[in-house]
Amino acid sequence: MAETQSSRTDEKNRKSPFKRFKEKIQTSRVETIQGIEVEHRVIPLWMKLLILLILMVLLFVVGTMIGYGILHNPFGVFKPETWQHIFELTGRSS
């Protein structure tokens, strides 16, 4: 019977990775250093900017594929001839 109780307490003490991550985010990240309150970031700023840049490029590619794919083959967006034709239509010389 003692084994079952200890196994139950072990199960309660073990937390899923999601719950540990959630608790880590929810805990206060404010620390006082030499009388100044400093808030630590969970995700570094450079990583946020990198993720934003990758998402912008990805959404641009997907958007052009959807827009061009309405009338033509969506993978035709990756051909240089397509972009040359688009630049000629808009009046921009390449």
Image (cartoon, rainbow, N blue to C red):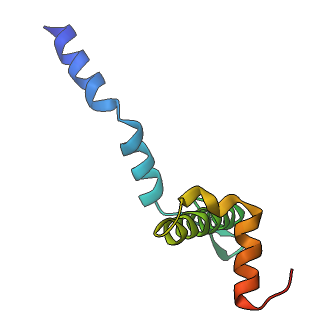
Q: Quadrant of the N terminus?
A: top left
Residue situated in front as seen by the camera: 33 or 88: 88
> Residue 38 is drawn in which quadrant?
bottom right
- How far from the left and from the top, in percent, is residue 62? 54, 63
Tally of marks? 0
Which of the two residues, 94 or 24, is positioned nearer the viewer here? 94
The residue positioned 80% from the left and 88% from the top of the image is 92
Q: Which sits in the foreground, 27 or 2?
A: 27
Viewed as shown, does residue 92 lie left or right of 22?
Answer: right
In the rendered image, the residue lying farthest to the right is 94
Residue 82 sits above or below residue 43 on the image: below
The image quarter in which residue 68 lies = bottom right
- Residue 79 image position (x, y, % from top left): 71, 60
Q: Quadrant of the C terminus?
A: bottom right
Task: Name the residue at 57% across, 69% down.
Answer: 64
Is the residue 56 above or below the residue 2 in the image? Answer: below
Foreground pick, 16 / 12: 16
Q: Is residue 20 above or below residue 85?
A: above
What is the x, y in percent for residue 23?
40, 51
Could you tell me which residue is drawn at 68 percent across and 76 percent down? Answer: 35
Which residue is the extreme one toward the left? Answer: 1
Residue 26 position by quadrant: bottom left
Residue at 60% from the left image edge and 62% from the top image edge: 58
Query: Viewed as shown, does residue 7 lie left or right of 23?
Result: left
Query: Percent position (x, y) of residue 73?
Result: 54, 59
